Amino acid sequence: MIVDELTKDLGCENPLGDDPTRVCSVMWVSESLPGNKSGGFYPFVIGLQYQIRNQKYSLLSDSGWVSVLPHVDSILVTFGDIAQVWSNGKLKKVRGRPMATVGDENGSRCITMSLLITLPTDSRVAPLLPKVTCNKDQKEEEIEGEEEENNDGGDEELEKRVFNSFDFEDYAWRVYHERILFKDPLDRYRVV
């Protein structure tokens, strides 16, 4: 339902459809220790984190670390790299999950849990270009003919792609294992 609302707001069709096996959820549990900002990364569409207490968090955006202070009893919602690709660059992502900001006093620590809505490893990730609306009087044959022309390079797309499509499993493996904090892993898929 969350992914459906996101894609609807972007003016696109949900690539997952009504098939519940096309979406995966990952519960990411981690301990935050003073000075530790290296948290793990896994590609996701949307991240959800319930705020049980008043706690400041750091998020890694494309421009660097950003601090947020969510309200108690709220849900911190973050868009991930898959949402940025689906939106063709319109949405700005955070890399990884929110990291609790823990003070250095008396060995403070904090356990965080984030629910990541992500894709099955056999998925292909590509920008979701807006749905083309047409007249009710147009025939299906005309629409199919236009699609063939677009695929053959005849007409230009209404909206230029910002990202090339890529294999989710390869991307997820690289993002999780390489852990390069300040290099955007999506850079290699950007159209230049």
Image (cartoon, rainbow, N blue to C red):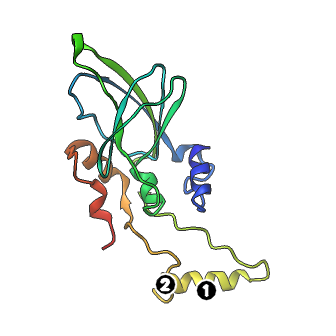
Give neighbour class at mark 1: few <14, some 14-19, many 20+ (Cα, 10 Å). few
Quarter of the figure that contains the C terminus: bottom left
Q: Eyeballing the image, is 165 above or below 58?
A: below
Give neighbour class at mark 2: few <14, some 14-19, many 20+ (Cα, 10 Å). few
Residue at image position (52%, 48%) is: 22
Residue at image position (48%, 25%) is: 51
Indicate the amino acid at tag 2.
Answer: Glu
Q: Eyeballing the image, is 98 above or below 109?
A: below
Q: Position of residue 14 (x, y in %)?
A: 58, 56
**Pick the front one: 135 or 148:** 135
Residue at image position (22%, 45%) is: 181
Q: Position of residue 104 (x, y in %)?
A: 22, 18
**Helix or strand or loop: what does disc 1 sit on?**
helix
Q: Which residue is mark 2?
A: 156
Q: CA distance from mark 2 to mark 1?
A: 14 Å
Residue 38: name its quadrant. top left
Specify whether residue 123 is in view.
no
**Pick the front one: 34 or 154:** 34
Q: Eyeballing the image, is 113 above or below 16?
A: above
